[in-house]
Amino acid sequence: MFDLHTHFIPPEVLLWLKDNQNVVDAKWEQKGPDRAEFLIVNNKWGFELKESFINPALYLLEQEKAGVSHSVVSPVPQLFLYDFPEQITAELSSVYNRALASWVREHKKRLSAFATIPLNSPVRAANELKSAMGLGLRGAIIGPGLSKVMLTDEFFNPFWEEANHQKAIIFIHPLLCEDPRLKQRMMPNLIGVPWETTICAADLLLSGLLDKYPDVKVLLAHGGGFLPYQIGRLNKGYEQWTGVSASLQAPPADYLRRFWFDSVLWTPASLRYLAEVVGEDKIVPGSDFPFDLCAWPPATYNESGVRSLLNEGS
């Protein structure tokens, strides 16, 4: 079984954070006697630094115990560092990607990985993507844009052009929503995370970007957020308004099937609905391990999606 949505922080990255803790305002806080330290960078999005995040042997053991024979490792979104000067983001990206590439080389049968890139500098992002894929990584994990710039903005063209040239997998993974209405009851995570994916994916779909860069494979986290459930509304808008249809060559439902989706949905009924809408060959097993809301162990699922995404034979 595969697990295409997992996260890990290599020792080299932890060392970089220690060395640069003042630069990125990194803090380690103990919040309870029975919990690991929480890592907080730039006063945002703190998370418990569980041993499974940072211990290579334990990570592999936990995946093996769950029946996972091959894991795709992603950097943690909390360390995208898009809010910092581009040279800082680029430096950590390089450290992170080289560390993951080295780990993957040691465990070729067990591991693959996605890179992190300095999305705040699209030219640097393009260069880092090229470098990381040259080291054997399969593409990149990125956030749903910058605070005021969507991924379809021309600002990001250098990145998308390189991703298309590399035939890269681009894994869209949101950060916590910062909508001021969602400040209570863990709503920035519970509904804010899938909402951020929904906004980003709808923008990608409606913009015509998937036609402009046809060799990029876009993987959406958490089952694509709320977009698959509301695809009928987009189809109706396509029929009614030229402002929706102008950039598209087919109805939105057709474009929805050009994304890939992980299985991090927690309920079998939701997963069945997604398969009905997009097809089983566009769904890949994932867990979001080892975050608190991981779907663990990952759903055992038809691996035709894995083969189509990773270009692996049957």
Image (tube, rainbow, N blue to C red):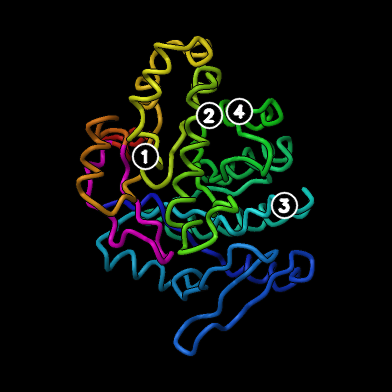
**Percent position (x, y) of residue 104?**
48, 56
- Name the N-terminal-most of marks 2 and 4: 4
Q: Which mark is residue 261?
A: 1
Q: Which mark is residue 83?
A: 3
In the rendered image of this protein, does residue 215 appear above or below residue 265?
Answer: above
Name the residue at 70% across, 67% down: 16
Q: Are marks 1 and 4 in contact (CB under 8 Å)?
A: no
Name the residue at 52% across, 18% down: 208
| Helix, strand or loop: magenta stretch | loop
Name the residue at 26% across, 41% down: 303
Q: Which residues are magenta?
A: 283-304
Tag 1 secondary structure: strand
Say which amino acid is labelled 4.
Thr
Q: Which residue is mark 4?
A: 152
**Percent position (x, y) of residue 314?**
25, 36
Tag 3 secondary structure: loop
Q: Is residue 105 covered in magenta? A: no
Front in this rendered view, residue 165 or 220: 220
